[in-house]
Image (cartoon, coloured by chain):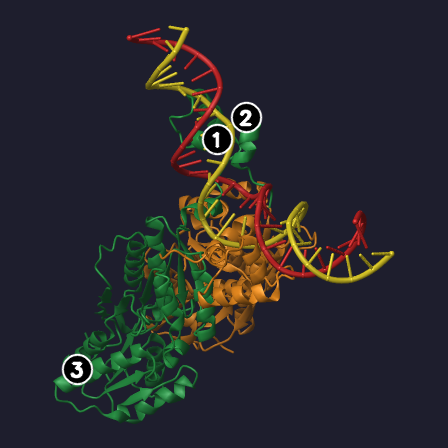
Chain colours: A green, B orange, C red, D yellow
DNA sequence: AAAGGGTACGAAACCGTTTTCGTGTTGACA
DNA sequence: TGTCAACACGAAAACGGTTTCGTACCCTTT
């Protein structure tokens, strides 16, 4: 990198002090009009830009917000990031992104790195491993240092900070209720293992909707599928039962369910309805297109960022800790009976 | 944010100078063992972390690389980012991400922002608008300031910097050749308007493969579809012709082609083969799954980042400007005849 | 006793900027 | 002629580190 032009360079050029140059460039009344004109002209010509590091050191503000997410190659997280970037940009902040890769160790490293002065605040979605082990001392440290922190989507209840979450329970309820209302009786649920909070919540919603209509929860209709296993064969199991609908807790499970249904010669939605979660490209472009719960990742990102920036700029108005719940809604497509 | 603990704080506590503390913490031989022990113990207890801004100002290095991409909600770009982050992390760098939203203005703003001292180098994929207007003075500025710059995927030929691109022409050729070899005669091409370089290159590959087999390029089989238009009706047009294969330059176009084929009662791949570009989730999980050109976004991200970090650390070894070409390959699935 | 050499630490410069608090010069006014 | 304000600018501190270059002290050596 070439030696950049600094206040000192300019000062030397004009035989004045750096303070004079600084003031001239900020159009201070202390400097004569003539001097100001000469200096600004020179600065513009040589494309002078104040060194942001120096500014940051002085003001103790970096105008950067750090984001830690489990992974980026995931439609939902991309949309969240997109929302975060939008408000960050509007409010004059930049975004620094790190991935935990769902590993506890990487998450801790990232937190420490970002917290050591390079960001004004942190936006975090917890990694799966951290969720499983329920360790959170790295966040406790942030809170002691009073570094603004907002968690979103995958949160830790034990950490006292602002949060933005999806109403997963309500969403599970909505999806199941919709299937019941459209005449389905035997609804299979394809979910994740228990430790992933969101899966559990969606399941609770599912069970609540069934109970409300006095339908017993049939465990043989529920498949807990780990992402590492053979998805196709795991999901096939529930097709052994007599079912007329499938509620999958994510897009991919839904797509696989559709594939299996087709293989078994079932017509969608006539013989079986399928409903997914997360409104991504798969749901939109597969044929038949898939009815889903849309999660509003963009909204979630925006809200989380707003919350954080308010906190950083101390505009939260002493509201204390907030937890915002983003409600989701159903987007009805071809894989279910309207 | 709480007042953080600094060298000065510690120095005052022990009645020594900041230099002593600094040296003690870096285990300098100049400091007595006893003093070192007392100071490090204290520092550990109070969780002292050197302020990274101060370090950065002094060393003139931020250990951050800036990335500017058109959009994040896009499978290919997510994978690229993922690759970038991987090597950045391995080599001790952080990643700062900005989106141009395909707008020239935002791209310029982002470049200026990142270039004003907050990053050690820049990784850029050009926005569509910039590509259309062929304006690139903002990059010229970077080059004059000798700020390391690597462009990837969507690049500007006029800017002299390192580049990492996909072999789009070769990929177009490969896809077309494969279709021809499997017995298809009338291959429709669904591409983007001309100004998007990648679309043009893929088309060239398509035409080259046809010519090689002495087949005339039939313009009525080529649809130039803009993303803003009604994709379904635009793509429908080529189905008016007699075709036995479709080569789409992206996943979404391919998915829509499949949908149209189904609507027309055509069997895939018996009546018509479909091949896409970009190996995303749609291709993998739709049924039938879609044969695609896989682009190796992860590899691209890694290579781009390697190139950049080498440049930053001056390890490029005077190789001059490099352009790396990532070759793509075909992933055969259900939508075509193996 | 003078010279030499470790030992253990401090002073100060430096990175680039902003900002507070002088300070020298000029002109006006009493 | 002395006083005072206004003007235009400079010196220095501050942000938080690292690093170079002293230097005071003590012990050994000749």
Q: Which residue is mark 1?
A: A21
Outermost left residue: A213
Q: Earlier in the sequence, mark 1 or mark 3?
A: 1
Which quadrant of the figure has residue B256? bottom left
Which quadrant of the figure has residue D27? bottom right
Q: Secondary structure at mark 2?
A: helix
Q: Secondary structure at mark 3?
A: helix
Q: Which mark is residue A209?
A: 3
Mark 2 chain: A
Q: Which residue corresponds to the image point at 38% horizontal and 77% vertical from the top-left?
A: A135
Where in the figure is residue B252, as x and y percent of width and height? 39, 65
Q: Which residue is mark 2?
A: A14
Q: Earlier in the sequence, mark 2 or mark 3?
A: 2
Do the residues under discs 1 and 3 have CB atoms within 8 angstroms?
no
Mark 3 chain: A
Q: Which residue corresponds to the image point at 50% horizontal and 42% vertical from the top-left?
A: B138
Left or right of A316: which side holds B220? right
- Label 3: few (<14), some (14–19) or many (≥20) C-alpha neighbours in 10 Å: many
């Amino acid at each position: 990198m070439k030696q950049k032009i600094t206040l000192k360079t300019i000062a030397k050029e004009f035989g004045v002090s750096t303070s004079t140059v600084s003031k001239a460039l900020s159009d201070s009344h202390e400097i004569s009009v003539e001097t100001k004109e000469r200096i600004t002209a020179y600065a513009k010509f040589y494309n002078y830009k104040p060194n942001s590091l120096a500014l940051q050191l002085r003001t103790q503000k970096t105008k950067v917000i750090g984001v830690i997410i489990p992974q980026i190659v995931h439609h939902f997280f991309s949309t969240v990031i997109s929302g975060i970037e939008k408000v960050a940009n509007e409010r004059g902040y930049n975004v620094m992104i790190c991935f935990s890769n769902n590993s506890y160790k990487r998450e801790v490293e990232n937190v420490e790195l970002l917290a050591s002065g390079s960001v004004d605040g942190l936006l975090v979605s917890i990694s799966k491993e951290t969720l499983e082990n329920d360790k959170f001392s790295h966040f406790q440290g942030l809170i002691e240092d009073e570094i603004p922190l907002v968690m979103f989507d995958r949160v830790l209840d034990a950490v006292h900070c602002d949060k933005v979450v999806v109403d997963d329970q309500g969403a599970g309820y909505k999806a199941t209720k919709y299937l019941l209302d459209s005449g389905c009786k035997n609804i299979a649920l394809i979910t994740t293992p228990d430790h992933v909070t969101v899966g559990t919540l969606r399941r609770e919603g599912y069970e609540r909707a069934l109970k409300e209509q006095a339908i017993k929860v049939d465990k043989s209709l529920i498949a807990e599928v780990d992402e590492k296993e053979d998805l196709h064969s795991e999901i096939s199991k529930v097709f052994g039962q007599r079912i007329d609908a499938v509620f999958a807790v994510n897009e991919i499970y839904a797509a696989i369910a559709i594939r299996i249904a087709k293989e078994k010669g079932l017509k969608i939605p006539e013989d079986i309805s399928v409903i997914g979660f997360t409104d991504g490209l798969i749901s939109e472009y597969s044929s038949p297109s898939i009815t889903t719960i849309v999660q509003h990742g963009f909204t979630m990102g925006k809200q989380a960022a707003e919350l954080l920036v308010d906190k950083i700029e101390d505009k939260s108005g002493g509201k204390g800790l907030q937890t915002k719940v983003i409600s989701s809604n159903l987007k009805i497509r071809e894989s279910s009976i309207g």
